[in-house]
Image (cartoon, helix red, strand yellow):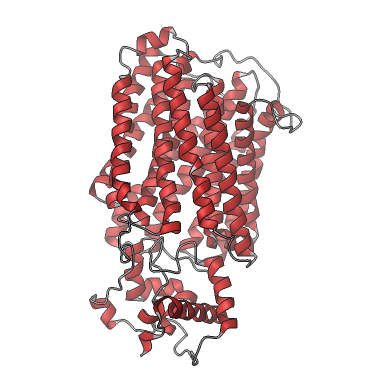
Amino acid sequence: MRFSKVHIEYRQENPNWKSSLSIHWMRWAVFFFFMASIFGLLLRYFFVAGSGIFEYKHVLHAHSHIAILGWGFLLIGGTIVFSFVENQIRLKIYKKFLFAFVLTTIGMMLSFPVQGYGVFSIAFSAIHVLISYFFAYKLFKDLSHISNGTAKSLIQYALIWMLVSSIGLWAIAPIGTLLGKIHPLYFLSVQWFLHFQMNGWFMYAILGILAYHLESKGWEIPMSHSKLGLLHLSLLFTFAFPTSWSYNFDFLLYLNGVGVILQAIAYAWILMPFIAQAFPRMAMPAGWINKMIYVGIISLILKALIQLALIIPEVASISSTIRMYFIGFIHLLMLGALTFGISALIIKNNGLPKNSFCKWGWTILIIAFLATELLLFGQGTLIWAKLGFLPQYHLILFLASLLFPVALSMVLIGLFQAKKKSEIPMTIIEKNITQISINNQTMKKTMIMSLGAVLILMASCGGSGGSDQGTYTPPSSNTKEKVADPKGIGEIRNVDLGDGIDEAMANNGKAILDMKCTACHQLNDKRVVGPGFQGITNRRRPEWIMNMITNVDVMLDEDPVAQALLEECLTRMPNQNISLDESRDILEFLRKNDLEKTGSKDAAIK
């Protein structure tokens, strides 16, 4: 594999990063990153002190939308615009896009925590998607004037996959109307958007931006049609893995195995020249900016290696059942590869300032990222090894997550401080764009008002809220439940409970439950992803509980009670492949948990 240095005339250092518009663009991106970190911190708070007036899933939707469509979209989109678009008149068009994206993202930021998927949040999300179509069209036109190269090809395909990912969003409404919100296709449409957004739009753009950085330095990165084809095939084949969460077919895991192998090969072709140029001896680079790039590249490599490990069926099963692994993997891409890798390149091109506030902000952000990743993957590994939980795990994770908004507030201060000190020099482009740039004071006021509105809404979340807040109330008045089989659907028709609690069985059940259940369910009455376990043996018969554990797909498709729960939580419980004996052990622990917390158990059969 050989890579040569050539002179590419059109890719000289782009002065557009010194424009006023680029600074405003990145300020808004970092602001939405800051707000996403606030929502993420609130998600951690649910596991520490329970919920208040907000529902976990509403905050989760707010966090994911602001992180993806606020921070991720603006960071990637802005990097592409200010790297490739040089025409001053064309740049003015993107100022209007910035205004539209900011407006719709603020709308999502304020509506999702209150109503989840509701009229306003869906409207703002849909408008954002429609605007992104025009944004992609304008970028395609601007890229058509650029000389061909690997960077250009990857960026163009990134935009295509962005458009493809939106198909999943438009499919949600008709599928929900025709087939219902509990149909596997409903959840698969969500996974379609996430897969092609993360692994298509974001990953292709990250690779394209890295290629652009090398090509601007005079490096040639050969990328034939066959190599690009392998990258496309890997993206399509790896969609088999999230599909397997809705449809439990063995061949899907084999198809995903082929996909991750092709992906590893394609990533190697693209990343090897960057690694060779940036870190020829893989030694820790000097300077905090280079360390950010280092973290980004290592995150990309780890992402590919983790996905490569999914060819082992046992690893695939673990990755989909231990939620800490899933969250850690998403953060590896969004925080590791995207945030540090791309942001560092922007800093190098003077698109973000290098003052002391920013330096320490990014440094603390790296510390927060590494600490939370170690906690997530470490705790996930302990659960896999059936070694239980770290003492005060959720509290420690919450405290580590506090570093994210602290670090990002420092970066924001550094961004505004840089403008005052004229750290970023004035250019001819800035003089033209300044005439239409967003007013500084207006921008500050909008940010403060947006943050204040969210904080006012969140203030009540820290209150007591009452013991009934966020609990699950069984829909006993539902007509479907009245005719439902109280024992559920499955082979378990009778369970011998015995007189007391079998401690050995309860201990085994707790170990299994810790590994496969507690990331979504708590042992109290608080609902997080799913309803809390407290009181379940007093509401449901033991047969129903065991059938729900061992026959989850059929229960979700046919049992009215399970369907009502699914429609309420909107998160399809995965098939954990738990045996009958293991489900009996889990039941025994749930009986013990209810006896300790409520003073009674087995009320459903009395």
Residue 488 against residue 448 in the figure, above or below: below
Residue 405 against residue 13 in the figure, above or below: below
Q: Quadrant where the N terminus lies? A: top right
Residue 506 against residue 453 in the figure, above or below: below
Q: In which quarter of the image is residue 439?
A: top left
Q: In this view, does 553 lie to the left or right of 98?
A: right
Q: Where is residue 13 in the image (x, y as percent from the top left)?
A: 55, 15
Q: What count of labels does the image hold? A: 0
Q: Which of 229 and 419 is in front in this view?
A: 419
Q: Quadrant where the C terminus lies? A: bottom left
Q: In which quarter of the image is residue 382?
A: bottom right
Q: In which quarter of the image is residue 253?
A: bottom right
Q: Which of 532 and 543 is in front in this view?
A: 532
Query: In this view, which residue lies farthest toward the right?
Result: 281
Query: In this view, which residue lies farthest toward the top?
Result: 428
Q: Can residue 547 be seen in this view?
A: no
Q: Is residue 426 visible?
A: yes
Q: Is residue 222 left or right of residue 76?
A: right
Q: Position of residue 269 (x, y in %)?
A: 66, 35
Q: Where is residue 586 in the image (x, y as percent from the top left)?
A: 52, 77
Residue 72 against residue 441 in the figure, above or below: below
Q: At 57% from the left edge and 53% from the top edge, which residue is drawn?
A: 376
Q: At 36% from the left edge and 13% from the top edge, which residue is drawn?
A: 433
Q: At 57% from the left edge and 33% from the top edge, which residue is drawn?
A: 363
